[in-house]
Structures are given as structure tokens and as C-alpha cells.
Image (cartoon, rainbow, N blue to C red):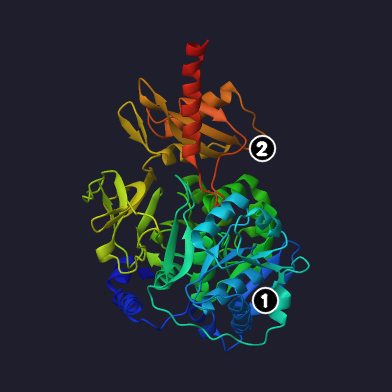
Amino acid sequence: MRDYAEAVRAFDHAQAAAAALHGDLTALNACVECCDRHAGAGKLALTSMDRDGNIARYSFDQLSDLAARFATVLKAQGVQAGDRVAGLMPRTPELLITILATWRLGAVYQPLFTAFGPKAIEHRLDQSHARVVVTDSNNRAKLDDVHGCPTIITVNARSGELDFQQSLASTTERCEAQMRSGNDPFLLMFTSGTTGPAKPLEVPLRAIVAFQGYMRDAIDLRPQDNFWNLADPGWAYGLYYAVTGPLSLGHATTFYDGPFSVDSCAQVIDTLGITNLAGSPTAYRLLIAAGDAFAKPVKGRLRVVSSAGEPLNPEVIRWFADELGVTIHDHYGQTELGMVLCNHHGLQHPVHLGSAGFAIPGHRIVVVDEQGQELAAGQPGILAVDREQSPLCWFGGYHGLPTKAFVGKYYLSGDTVELNPDGSISFVGRSDDVITTSGYRVGPFDVESALIEHPAVVEAAVIGKPDPERTELIKAFVVLASGHVASAELEETLRQHVRQRLYAHAYPREIEFVSELPKTPSGKLQRFILRNQEVAKQQAQQATPASA
């Protein structure tokens, strides 16, 4: 394992690679980088498992041929370099073929999450001006209600419509890769909508170097690993790090076409011999809730586990160490940045509970105030990227929209963090999630983590509820574990549990037991929905006496 400081000092090679990507105008194609250049030796690229346990394996050679032929199909529908091709598909080989074929043409791939309804799909297709959308028979009906839907190609198509398999089978011509520049886009992403409407952004080809750095240093992807990223490629973490990252390093990835469950997760790990796992705290908390039913068959199988999407609760870290005998590390990033702040599996540095870790080499991550002034250790502020000293930072703004997040040379993430004396950074919460109560600032993450430590709690979301005396009071929404029943006694037990683990003012004065929490389709908590609900309730209560 390399020392973190040594890795940062040895970053000259990555800086040179980033400069080459900036300067070379006609040298890159994402299909070549993620497929063609690894072909020729029959090397494995994809292991695909369906919900019935059937397994299919594809080499880089096979994917190169399939992508080159499907690129010809897309070209026949008018797709050219720079055009958008959308994919509304589950995690199947056809999805990966579509992505690679799009890139081969020098076109831009736009993911559509399969849980989206027609309106969410319509908004994204309208924003992207996609020329073609590729889907499957299970999702095809959603496109009937999409106004102005582009040309549709369907896996197992309706009669009279373009069929994926038939079109591919009838095509022998291999489309040549269209070379592009490092600043040309190869992905069109939309933010997850954690705090507001989803915004579009283009990901340039030079971002591939940054994705590779994350796979090597943070994920610690090794040639002998069987790697599985639980994230759906309909979202950034899946598309960046279940597809682009591993394949660009010539490493096979894993697709599971089925709903996430404790049983399916254990089955994939056991059957495919997964040793390197990546996912989200939401998924990991479900595994913890299953207890021995998941832990016993999996213990000792995993070498490392990585977590991204939202902060990793300390209880999850302890459970994975105690019950599975594996180290799980927290990683931080955004759709706009990729992963930039990590507890690295592949680099040696201090790891503290509650800390998101250190900047990935190639990025300078700092804490600033709202005026863009850097803050010293111990002062909460906004996590920011120093763009002038971050050669692997590729985000240039939102597509067709103003970007208010740029202040001078900094990109402001909107997340409240705190610099630690050793240079690591701890997550506090989204800037608009931080609670001000009786003059104190309280991060919801700490309170949620304390609640989750109690055996009765599976999940928790904490918000600041407007209060005339305290500015805000802390309210918790709690999902109970199986076998536990909501009661006033349990509510008080949880209050005291948090008070004992944190401090006197940082406990939930109100607790509401709920069956589920509002989340984005990618699994991130949407605390703003809970806050808005509480404000609406208060307004309704205040209006009732006046109208009586």
C-alpha cells in the first residue's frame, strides 16, 4: 500500500496525462479507451447475472465487435459525433453495448433511470435533444406518454418497431471509432435532485483519467479482484465507476439484472466470488438489518468495501468490521465532480470515524466561507475545490444553465464540512440541512448516526423544524427495525440514547415513526421534503384559528 503523501508527491504523471487530454484535439474515443484497447487476448470485460441466476460472460473482444456493429445501427438512424443517445434499460449486456456503441460514434450517452416515470423521462429527453432512445420491453410503454419522443430502439420490440437484436444480427459492418478531443463530452448527466430540480451537465472525455484514479487509489482495484458496484448505471456513481472506471483500466465489471435484496446480494457475492464491493449506505443498512442471515454466508469473502452517495454512519463501519471481517471506507463525491474526497483503500493515511477522508490526488479540496475565504481546522464551512490547483477537476458548469457554484477559483459544493488538524475533512451535512438550535449549529448526520446505533432503528432522517424560541428544534423521522413497535416509551428511550452519545442540546425533541423516508431514486435522503412538510403543517395550523 502506498503512502498518501507519497502518492500526492508522485502525481506528476497524472498531471501530464491531464495536460495531454487538454491539448490533444483528435486523440480520444471512450469506446477505444474502455474496450478496444483491451481487446486481443480474450480478456473478460463483463459478468452478467440475471434474477434467475443465469450467468453470461463477455470478453473485451466480443464487446468491441458488438459495439462496432450496433454503432452502425445507430448511425443509420442519423446519430453523429456530438449527438445524444439515451438509454432506458436495466443492467443487462444490451445496456453496455448501447453505451459503448454511442461512444464509438463520438456521440454522448445519456442515462435514464428505469424507475423514472414518463414526466421525468420527458424532461430529460427534452433537455438533451436526444436523437435516439434505446430501451427494453419492460420500459417501452413509458415512452408512449413522452411528448416528442425521439426514435426508439427496443430489446424485444413491438411488432413493426425497431428491434435491438434483429438490427444487430442483420448488421455485419463495423463502424470505425470517431476520435474526439479531451474537452468533448461523452456523457450527459443530470444531478440527482437532492435539493432541487435536476440540472444537466456534460462530462468531458478527460474525466476518464480522474475516474481511473478513484478506481486505483480509493477502490484499490487489483487485477485479481472480482469487482461489483451495486449502483445502477442510470446514475453517476454507477456510470462513472461500474462502467467507465473499471473498463478503462481493462478490468471486468459485474451487472446484476434484478432488484436489490439481502438474498440477491448474498447470492451474487457467493456465486461470482466478489471480493471488492462498492455501494451506498442505504443498501448497507438493509444488509445490517438482516443480521446473520446475510453475514454468515458472506463473512470472509470480501477483501474491501467502499461506500458513496451519502455519509457512512459509524455503526455501519463497526458492523462490517465485526460481522463480516472487512474494512468499509467512506467516499465523497458529486455528479459534478466524481469522487474527490476519500478514505482510500489503496493509500495509507489516518482514518477517523465520521471523516470523509483526504482529497484524491489531482484535487485540492479546502473548506471556505461563503465569501470564498479558506478556513482553518476546526471551523465549519463549505467544501470547495480549488480549480486552479486541481488538474483532474473536469466540471465546467451546467449545460445551458448559469452556475452559481463558482466563486473565484473555487467550486462550492453546497456541503458543510470541517477540516481536521491532520488534513482530513469531516462531513457535517448539506449547507441547507444544518440545523441552528438555541444558538448551536448541529449537523443532522451526527444525530442520525446516533439513532442508527440503537437496535430498534433501521434508518433515520433529522431536520430542523422552525421554532420561535430555538430558531429550530431537532426533529427525527425514524424507520423501526422488525419486531419493534412505536410508542411514547420508545420515543423517550431514543431521545436519551442520543443525548448520552452526543451532547445535551443535540437530541431530537420530536420523533415521528414512519414506514419509509423520502429519497431520490439513487437512494439519497431528501431532507428538504420533510422540512417542507413540517413548514406546511405549521402554516396550516396557524391558518386554522383565523379561518374558524
Give the amino acid at mark 1.
Answer: Arg
Q: Give neighbour class at mark 2: few <14, some 14-19, many 20+ (Cα, 10 Å).
A: few
Q: Is residue 282 left or right of residue 312?
A: right
Residue 7 figure quarter:
bottom left
Eyeballing the image, is 189 above or below 379? below
Residue 352 visible at all: no
Secondary element under disc 2, as helix, strand or loop, is loop
* Distance Cα–Cα, label 2 vs label 1: 38 Å
Q: Is residue 508 left or right of residue 166?
A: left
Q: Residue at x 57, y 85 (%)?
A: 175
Q: Residue at x 59, y 36 (%)?
A: 479
Q: Name the foreground residue: 493 vs 188.
A: 188
Give the residue pinned by disc 2: 482
Give the residue pinned by disc 1: 57
Residue 49 figure quarter:
bottom right
Secondary element under disc 1, as helix, strand or loop, is strand
Residue 88 in picture, x, y percent from top left = 62, 62
Q: Name the foreground residue: 245 vs 131.
A: 131
Q: Residue at x 46, y 17 (%)?
A: 542
Residue 24 figure quarter:
bottom left
Number of marks in picture = 2
Of all residues, the one furthest to the bottom in this rendering is 40
Give the amino acid at mark 2.
Answer: Ser
Residue 150 in picture, x, y percent from top left = 60, 64
Of all residues, the one furthest to the front in this rendering is 148
Residue 347 in picture, x, y percent from top left = 38, 66
Of all residues, the one furthest to the top in this rendering is 548
Eyeballing the image, is 471 above or below 444? above
Residue 531 in picture, x, y percent from top left = 46, 33
Image quadrant containing the N terminus: bottom left
